[in-house]
Image (cartoon, rainbow, N blue to C red):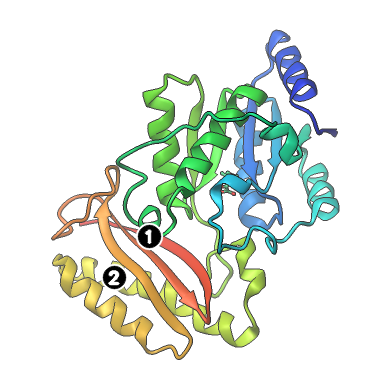
Amino acid sequence: MQIFRTVREMQAWSLGRRAEGRRIALVPTMGALHEGHLALIDAAKKQADEVVLSIYVNPTQFGPQEDFDKYPRTFDRDSDLAEQRGVAAIFAPSNEEMYPAGHQTFVTVTELSRGLCGAFRPGHFRGVTTVVAKLFLIVQPQRAFFGEKDYQQLKVIQRMVADLNIPVEVIGVETVRDPDGLAMSSRNAYLSPEERSEALAISRSIALAQDLVKQGTHDCKNILDQVQGLLFQGKFTMVQYAEIVDEEMLAPLAAVERPARLILAVYINGKRLIDNGPLRP
Ligand code: PAF
């Protein structure tokens, strides 16, 4: 497995592989790999000849009060896992390599970035789309794999690729959960055992919404009241937002009459977790 730290080396390798007719898949990550990332690598391996894993904690997607400094950085463990999983190359640049002095170009997806997480994390999606556009140009993949856990991120990136005619197929992979239902996230490492057990209410609230829809409740206010009722039982829990939105446009819905998503951001004792699940009428 190759490890590249510079744009020049990474791009040269990818262009070389493409010239040989090899299909490249990119799995972009910020490291601290868990089973969710490994599922992305496995999906990528099935649909490409070479899998490139990027590991980069991107400063432009973190707000000033957010966890950029304490975000877990576990490069040695990550590269061992990547090698065991058959990754061909890791791209792990420095900040100076990604944002050299004088950098001033950003990519913004206007509408889809506005609501949900975008409303509470100003500039977050601008940072994500900028770094992902750069990764696409550096790694030159034909396909890229993202987890559905960051559902808004997935939709924003798919929109960017369509709007800018970027020749990369963006593929969403279903959220991987622990056996008790908690969605895998690098930020789960911040939770104490007590907080983790309270966080299980998040996936339970999604299951509750799915059951309500199955039983014929389509009114979003009614569903969201019951979701909030379940979450409010936790002593550490603060709901930042809970919305039912159209699955593609992410616009809030009054009733689940077409494919929809319940999307939530919840603080457990100050630690922010996000999750979502499909609601099928
Ligand atoms: O989902 C993530 O880990 C990040 O937002 C991404 C896509 C790697 C961009 O930094």
Q: Tell me the SS state at disc 1.
A: strand
In this rendering, position of residue 102 left or right of residue 225:
right
Of 83 and 132, which appears nearest the observer? Answer: 132
First in residue order: circle 1 vs circle 2: 2
Residue count near mark 2 (Cα–Cα under 10 Å), binned few <14, some 14–19, many ≥20: many
User: Distance from label 1 to label 2 (Cα)?
Assistant: 9 Å
Q: Which residue is mark 2?
A: 209
Asked if the residue at label 1 sits under 8 Å from ligand 1, the reply is: no
User: How far across and down, in percent of the image, does residue 37 sit?
Assistant: 64, 50
Relative height, residue 173 to residue 15 (above, below)? below
Q: Amino acid at mark 2?
A: Ala
Q: Looking at the rendering, in which quadrant would you find the C terminus?
A: bottom left
Q: Are marks 1 and 2 in contact (CB under 8 Å)?
A: yes
Residue beneath disc 1: 277
**Where is residue 119 shown, x and y percent of the image?**
35, 56
Q: Is residue 238 above or below residue 65?
A: below
In the foreground, 218 or 192: 192
Front residue (pair 260, 212): 260
Q: Residues within 10 Å of mark 1 (few under 14, many from 20)?
A: many
Secondary element at tag 2: helix
